Amino acid sequence: MTRTPVNVTVTGAAGQIGYALLFRIASGHLLGADVPVKLRLLEIPQGMKAAQGTAMELDDCAFPLLKGIDIFDDPNQGFDGANVALLVGARPRTAGMERGDLLSANGGIFKPQGAAINAHAADDIKVLVVGNPANTNALIAQAAAPDVPAERFTAMTRLDHNRAITQLAQKTGSDVTDIKRLTIWGNHSATQYPDIFHAEIAGKNAAEVVNDQEWLADTFIPTVAKRGAAIIEARGASSAASAANAAIDHVHTWVNGTAAGDWTSMGIPSDGSYGVPEGIISSFPVTTKDGKYEIVQGLDINEFSRKRIDASVAELVEERDAVRALGLI
Ligand SMILES: NC(=O)c1ccc[n+]([C@@H]2O[C@H](COP(=O)([O-])OP(=O)(O)OC[C@H]3O[C@@H](n4cnc5c(N)ncnc54)[C@H](O)[C@@H]3O)[C@@H](O)[C@H]2O)c1
Ligand SMILES: O=C(O)C[C@H](O)C(=O)O
């Protein structure tokens, strides 16, 4: 049976993450090795020529699953019929820019994109926001799309999740595949909290295996939370291939499910679980099945974790209040 191609819209397609992402979507890593895709690339007018160049290279790969590429500079066209939308393009912070300016500039991108998704995307649209500040940009887009179920808007903390797995594996001399049930809580920012108290390493409690509170507080958490800045310092540019890889992982897991006994981390609208105010887009431990996710319930949150989750959530509440004051939500 021939499957209908899935329409995947990627914004910021001519950027560095776009360049690392599009070839993997086209080769079947986003949705599955048997799922044909049509790419819809969305750029700003200045990015159109470079996006066309990337599309030429995609053509030159003769990917069996790639059934079409269209390029737009109008969100209403870019999101038309989209089943999956990866919102990567964003306004980066530049020298002298205050946080309010950054939120306002991104509001100018994510509000119209949310409205275009609301008006034109397919009924089963799933949205992943990668562009920073990812959680709050996702909130802005979601608020502009009242007819789309709120839970379809998610923000990426999978890169943080993957970073934390490797740091833990390297510390304990284990394999990344031995590590399960790790959680990123809160914001994709330096306040995020990577939690190993419920994680397992080859079936044993990770915090007990590590048994080094000082390493946890003074090395592990800051290393994971500040990894983005460390990459920028080392590479002279922000993470791109690892961010693209995490976007692939996020959507693949959302669509295809978490493995039995494991979970992942996703930025999702809070339902009030774990004391996170309803509606803000915060990272939680989630399981996924049949294209839907659920927050893992019933985890005991110790005092060490509570303090850190609360701090990151407080930052998200501040960001929400700031975009509310700007009339963006
Ligand atoms: N959540 C995460 O874990 C994570 C990780 C890494 C990077 N990021 C963020 O991802 C974003 C993209 O990073 P990058 O390195 O690809 O940046 P980049 O500057 O290389 O590319 C961004 C692209 O977006 C385009 N763009 C800007 N406004 C647009 C709009 N309104 N519509 C469509 N396209 C638009 C630009 O023309 C550019 O081509 C940044 O905000 C970055 O901070 C997030
Ligand atoms: O773009 C950034 O500021 C960093 C990025 O979010 C990352 O985590 O690598």
Image (cartoon, helix red, strand yellow):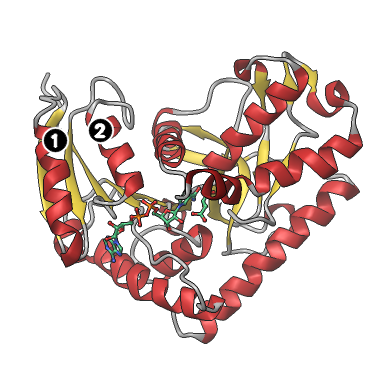
Disc 2 secondary structure class? helix
On screen, residue 217 versus residue 79, left or right, reads: right
Name the residue carrying label 2: 23
**Could you tell me if residue 300 is visible in this image?**
no
Q: Nearer the viewer, residue 117 or 11?
A: 11
Lower sequence index among marks 1 and 2: 2
Residue 75 position in % (x across, y down): 21, 64
Q: Which residue is mark 1?
A: 57
- Circle 2: residue type: Phe
Compare residues 6 and 194 and report the one nearer the observer: 194
Q: Position of residue 188 (x, y in %)?
A: 58, 53
Q: Residues within 10 Å of mark 2 (few under 14, many from 20)?
A: some
Which circle, 1 or 2, is nearer the viewer? 1
At 25% from the left and 50% from the top, the residue drawn is 13
Percent across and percent down for residue 288 are: 50, 34
User: Residue 269 occupies which quadrant of the picture?
Assistant: bottom right
Residue 14, disc: none
- Determine the image quadrant of residue 3: top left
